[in-house]
Image (spheres, rainbow, N blue to C red):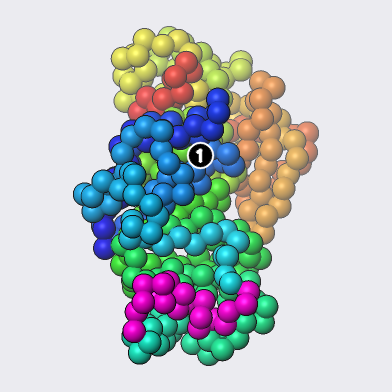
Amino acid sequence: MAEVRLENVCKSFGDVKAVDNISLHVKDGEFIVLLGPSGCGKTTTLRCVAGLEHVDEGKIFIDEKDVTDLPPAQRGLSMVFQSYAVFPHMTVFDNIAFGLKLRKTPADQIKERVKEVASLVQIEDLIDRYPYQLSGGQRQRVALARALAVEPKVLLLDEPLSNLDAALRLQMRAELKLLQKKSKVTTLYVTHDQVEAMSMGDRIAIIRNGSLEQVDTPERVFNHPENTFVGNFIGSPPMNMLECDVVEGGSIAIGNFTYKLPESVVKAIRKTKTSRVILGIRPKNITITKEKRKNAFMAKIGVIEPIGEELVVNLTVDGKLLRVIASPSQDLRMGEKVWLTPDSRKIHIFDKKTGKNLL
C-alpha cells in the first residue's frame, strides 16, 4: 500500500489550465474521490498521477518517492478506464494475466493469482470466455481484476461505472467499495456523479476549473460546504441560494420580509463587515405552511414535482427560484401563496463577494 501526494501540480493544454496548483495528500489505504463537473480537470489530475500526462509544474510522490518524471510502468499503480479497455481477442484469464505475463511471472503463480482476483470480483466461472460474451458489468469486473492482479500500490479509476445502466451502477458502487476495503489498496476515483462520490469516498476532493474547492468527508462537504460552489454542487435538489441585504437588529432582508438570524450567525457576519450575503438553505430544511409563522417569509408555488414519498415544490421568492421538499399529504397547489420557515440551525451564510462560508 502507499500514500499519494501532489504538491502544487499544474498542467495546461495551450492557454487552458486544466490543473491549477493542486496539492492533495491521499492516505495509505484511503478511497478518495475526485468530483466535479465535466471539464473541471479531474481526469487530467488522475492522468498526471498515472504518468500519462507530464506535469508542467509541481511534484507527485508515491510512498515518499518522487515519481514526477517516471514513466507509468515504474510508478507501481494500475488504472481502470471509463471504456474498460479489455482486450477483445483474449479470454478473461489472459486479460487478467496480461500484466503478470509482462513481468515474466512464473506460470503457476499467474494461475494462482488470476484465480484469486477472479474470485475477489466474482467472475471465477467466466475465465474461459471472451469479452464479447460478457455483459458491461462483467467486462468492468475483468478490467478491475486485471488492475488488481499486479498488486498495485495505487489503483486509479476513471469513471468506471458511467457506461452501466442505473440498476447495475447502484450494485457496482457497493461492490467496488467492498472490494477496495478488502484489498486495502489506496484508490483515487474520478466521477461527476455526486451520489457515487457521497456513497463511496472516505473523502471527496471537489474540483472546479482545475482548482480544489474543498477536500473533506462526505458528511462535511454536505453539511459544511466551504463556499457557494460546493453548497450548490452537492445535494439534489441543490442548496437554495438567496441574495440578501444585512439589516439592523441581526436580520437579513428577503424580498419584502426580514429573517431574524441566530446570534452566532450575526457575530460571524459582523466580523466581515459585509452588507450583502447569500443565505444558503437545503430544500429539506425549510418548512412550508399555509399559515403565517414567526420568522417566515412568503413565496408563490410554481411547479410541483412528485418524487415517490416526497414532493419537490418549486417556488418564487422576490422573483428568485427556490425549492422545498414537502410531504405528498400537504395540499399544495400551483399559484398558491405559502409561508416558508428555514431551520435556523441548518442555515449557511456566504459572503456575496467571495462566496466563502462565514460560519
Left or right of residue 347, residue 330 in this image: right
**Viewer-proximal residue, 143 or 316?**
143
Q: Residue at x 41, y 33 (%)?
A: 56
Give the number of marks.
1
Q: Nearer the viewer, residue 136 or 265?
A: 136
Q: Which residues are magenta?
A: 88-106
Q: Is residue 293 left or right of residue 26?
A: right
From where the camera sits, is residue 225 visible? Answer: no
The percent position of residue 77, horizontal first and vertical second, equals 37, 60
Residue 96 falls within the magenta-colored stretch: yes
Q: Bin the neighbour count of mark 1 within 10 Å (Cα to Cα): few under 14, some 14-19, many 20 and up.
A: many
Residue 51 is situated, as x and y percent measured from the top left of the image, at: 41, 49
> Which residue is pictured at 67% across the width and 82% down the height?
133
Is any atom of residue 106 visible in this view? yes
Which residue is denoted by mark 1 in the rendering? Answer: 41
Where disc 1 sits, the SS reads loop
The relative height of residue 69 versus residue 185 in the rendered view (above or below) is: above
Name the residue located 37 percent from the left edge and 32 percent from the top edge.
57
Task: Tell me the quarter of the image containing the C terminus.
Answer: top left
Could you say where residue 187 lies in the image, as x and y percent from the top left? 37, 58
Q: Residue at x 58, y 65 (%)?
A: 85
Magenta-colored stretch includes residue 209: no
Q: Residue furthest left?
A: 64
User: What amino acid type should be assigned to the residue bearing mark 1?
Assistant: Gly
> Where's residue 83, x and y in %?
60, 61
